[in-house]
C-alpha cells in the first residue's frame, strides 16, 4: 500500500465492482430462460488471443448462430458462467467482506422475456432477481443495474433481424418498464444499454446483428444504435411518470478516445475527428440532437438512417441522468497509417500491454474522465475498470496478483486526480471482482477478479472461490476511502 497523491474521494463515494449476468449467472436452462446473444459464443481452442479478439470484431454469421443452438461439439462458457445464479449469496458475502458500497450487474433480458417479444414476463426470473437485489440491500450494497449487457434474446435476431428493426424498440421498452415497475423502489441507478458505442467492435453482442444479415452493415449498426437511444429515452420518459426522485436513468460508453501519434497537424486533426465520433453517442443522449460532424460522416459513408421527428423529440425531452464509462486501455492514431474510419487505430509504442494487447495507461483514465466531464457536466460512474491477466492458484490456495494491485492502484489515483479537477464522479466499479467468463474471448483464464474462481476454459474443476492478494488490498483501499492505494 502507498499514499494516494490524489485522495479526493467524497465521503459517500460508491466503491464497488461490476459484472454482467451474461458472463456470470450461468443456469441457462433454469426456470424458463431463453438463449441470448452471449449464450451462442463458443470457446474456440487453439487460437491466439489476438485471433480470438479479431473474430469478436467480425461477429457471427447467421448460420453459425443457428448451428450453435443445437451444437454439442463445442463448449459455450457463458451458458454456465460462474453459476452466480445459484451462488449469489456467498459471492455477495465476499463483496460485503471487502467493504463494497455498490455492485453493478445486469438482469438478463432473455431470462425475463425469453423470446424478447413475449406477452408476459417470466415471474420466476423477476422473483429471483428480486431476492438478489434484496440481498445486496441487506448487505448495504447499492445495486447499479444494467438493463441490457449483451443479453439480446436470440429470437430477436432470428425473427426480427436484431436491433436495426424498429419493432425491437417497443419490446425493449416493455422490458425496461417491467424492471422499473418491479425494482424502481429499490434500485436508484439504471444503465439502459451497456457500452452503447461498442457496436463497431462487438456488433454481434451489442445489437444482435449477424455479419451477413445486412448489405450495408455500417448503416445497420448505426440504425441499431439509434434505436437503442430511442428506447433509452422512452424508458427515461416512463421513469419520470413514476414520480420517484431516486430513479436515475443513465447511458454508458466504452472509452474509445485516442491520442495523436505526434504533434503533426495531420495526426492531431485525425485524433480530434476520431474522438468526435466517439462523443456522437453521448452528444445525442445528453444534448438531444445529432451533431453535424456525424451527419457529414453518415453522408460520406452512404449511411441513411431512418429517424423520425417524434423519435428525436423524445430523445431531446429525455436526456440521460448520468454517464457510465468503462475504461481498460488507450489507443492512438497515426495519419500515415490510419484513416478517418471509426476504430481505425494503432498501438502506442510508449505503453506496455497485457497478454491480450490491451495497453496499460492510467493517465488515459484521467484524460477520458476529464474530457467527458468537461463536455457534459453530468455525474459519472466508472462502470468498468480492470486488467485481464493469467493468474496462478498456488498449492496453498493463494493468488499473488501484484500486477492487478499496481494497475488498479494507479488507475484509482487518476480517478482522484479527475475528482480534484472538478469531475463529478460518484462510483468506481472494478470489473469482474469475482472471476468470470471473458466477454471478448470466452476465456476463464483471462481473469480480472479479487476472488479466484477455480474453473478452466473448458468449464472443468470445482468452481471454488479463493481470495487473491488483491482482495485484501481493495478492502484496505475502500476502508481508507482511497487515501491508501
Image (cartoon, helix red, strand yellow):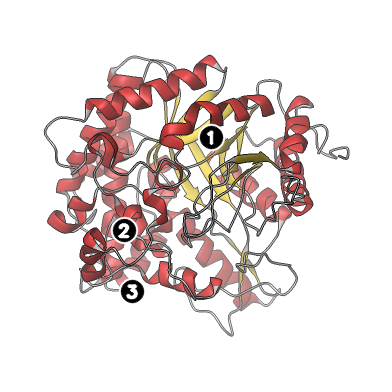
Residue shown at 48%/58% (left/top)? 278
Give residue 358's position: percent from left, percent from top. 62, 64
User: Which residue carries the number 1 mark?
Assistant: 378
SS at mark 1?
A: loop
Task: First in sequence, mark 1 or 3: give its number.
Answer: 3
Cα distance in 3D space between marks 1 and 3:
32 Å
Mark in front: 1 vs 3: 1
Q: Is residue 336 left or right of residue 467?
A: left
Mark drawn on residue 300: 3
User: Which residue carries the number 2 mark?
Assistant: 40
Give residue 19's position: percent from left, percent from top. 50, 41
The foreground one among 305 and 481 is 481
SS at mark 2?
A: helix
Residue 471, quarter of picture: top right
- Quadrant of the image for the N terminus? top right
Q: Is residue 179 above or below residue 36?
A: above
The reply to whether residue 186 is in sight is yes
Cα distance in 3D space between marks 3 and 2:
35 Å
Q: Is residue 464 above or below residue 224?
A: above
Residue shown at 21%/41% (left/top)? 114
Q: Are marks 3 and 2 in contact (CB under 8 Å)?
A: no
Cα distance in 3D space between marks 2 and 1:
37 Å
Q: Is residue 361 above or below residue 381?
A: below
SS at mark 3?
A: helix
Amino acid at each position: 500500500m502507498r499514499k494516494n497523491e490524489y485522495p479526493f474521494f467524497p465521503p459517500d463515494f460508491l466503491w464497488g465492482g461490476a459484472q454482467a449476468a451474461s458472463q456470470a449467472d450461468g443456469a441457462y436452462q433454469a426456470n424458463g430462460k431463453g438463449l441470448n446473444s452471449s449464450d451462442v459464443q463458443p470457446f474456440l481452442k487453439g487460437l491466439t488471443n489476438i485471433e480470438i479478439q479479431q473474430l469478436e470484431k467480425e461477429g457471427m454469421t447467421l448460420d453459425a448462430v443457428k448451428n450453435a443452438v443445437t451444437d454439442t461439439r463445442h463448449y459455450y462458457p457463458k451458458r454456465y458462467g460462474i453459476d452466480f445464479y445459484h451462488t449469489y449469496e456467498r459471492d455477495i458475502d465476499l463483496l460485503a467482506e471487502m467493504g463494497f458500497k455498490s455492485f453493478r450487474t445486469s438482469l438478463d433480458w432473455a431470462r425475463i422475456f425469453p423470446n424478447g417479444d413475449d406477452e408476459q414476463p417470466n415471474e420466476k426470473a423477476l422473483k429471483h432477481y428480486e431476492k438478489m437485489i434484496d440481498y445486496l440491500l441487506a448487505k448495504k450494497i447499492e445495486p447499479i443495474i444494467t438493463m441490457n449487457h449483451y443479453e439480446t434474446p436470440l429470437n430477436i435476431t432470428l425473427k426480427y433481424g436484431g436491433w436495426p428493426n424498429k419493432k425491437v424498440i417497443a419490446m425493449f421498452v416493455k422490458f425496461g418498464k417491467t424492471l422499473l415497475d418491479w425494482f424502481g423502489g429499490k434500485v436508484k441507478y439504471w444503465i439502459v444499454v451497456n457500452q452503447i458505442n461498442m457496436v463497431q467492435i462487438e456488433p454481434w453482442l451489442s445489437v444482435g446483428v449477424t455479419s451477413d444479415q445486412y448489405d450495408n452493415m455500417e448503416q445497420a449498426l448505426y440504425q441499431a444504435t439509434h434505436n437503442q437511444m430511442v428506447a433509452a429515452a422512452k424508458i427515461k420518459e416512463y421513469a419520470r411518470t413514476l414520480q420517484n426522485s431516486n430513479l436515475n436513468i443513465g447511458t454508458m460508453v466504452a472509452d474509445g478516445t485516442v491520442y495523436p501519434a505526434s504533434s503533426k497537424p495531420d495526426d492531431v486533426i485525425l485524433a480530434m475527428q476520431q474522438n468526435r465520433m466517439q462523443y456522437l453517442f453521448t452528444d445525442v443522449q445528453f444534448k438531444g440532437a445529432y451533431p453535424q460532424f456525424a451527419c457529414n460522416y453518415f453522408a460520406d459513408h452512404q449511411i441513411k438512417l431512418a429517424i423520425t421527428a417524434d423519435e428525436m423529440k423524445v430523445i431531446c425531452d429525455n436526456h440521460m441522468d448520468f454517464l457510465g464509462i468503462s475504461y481498460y486501455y488507450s489507443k492512438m492514431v497515426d495519419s500515415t497509417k490510419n484513416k478517418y474510419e471509426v476504430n481505425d487505430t494503432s498501438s502506442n509504442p510508449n505503453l506496455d500491454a497485457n497478454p491480450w494487447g490491451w495497453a496499460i495507461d492510467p493517465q488515459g483514465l484521467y484524460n477520458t474522465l476529464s474530457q467527458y466531464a468537461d463536455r457534459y457536466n453530468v455525474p459519472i460512474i466508472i462502470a468498468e475498470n480492470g486488467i485481464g491477466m493469467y493468474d496462478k492458484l498456488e498449492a496453498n490456495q493463494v493468488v499473488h496478483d501484484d500486477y492487478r494491485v499496481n494497475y488498479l492502484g494507479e488507475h484509482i489515483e487518476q480517478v482522484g486526480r479527475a475528482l480534484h479537477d472538478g469531475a463529478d464522479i460518484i462510483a468506481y466499479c472494478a470489473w469482474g471482482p469475482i472471476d468470470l467468463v471473458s466477454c471478448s474471448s470466452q476465456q476463464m483464464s483471462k481473469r480480472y477478479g479479487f476472488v479466484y474462481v477455480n474453473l478452466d476454459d473448458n468449464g472443468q474443476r470445482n468452481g471454488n472461490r479463493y481470495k487473491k492478494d488483491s482482495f485484501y488490498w481493495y478492502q484496505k483501499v475502500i476502508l481508507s476511502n482511497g487515501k491508501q492505494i
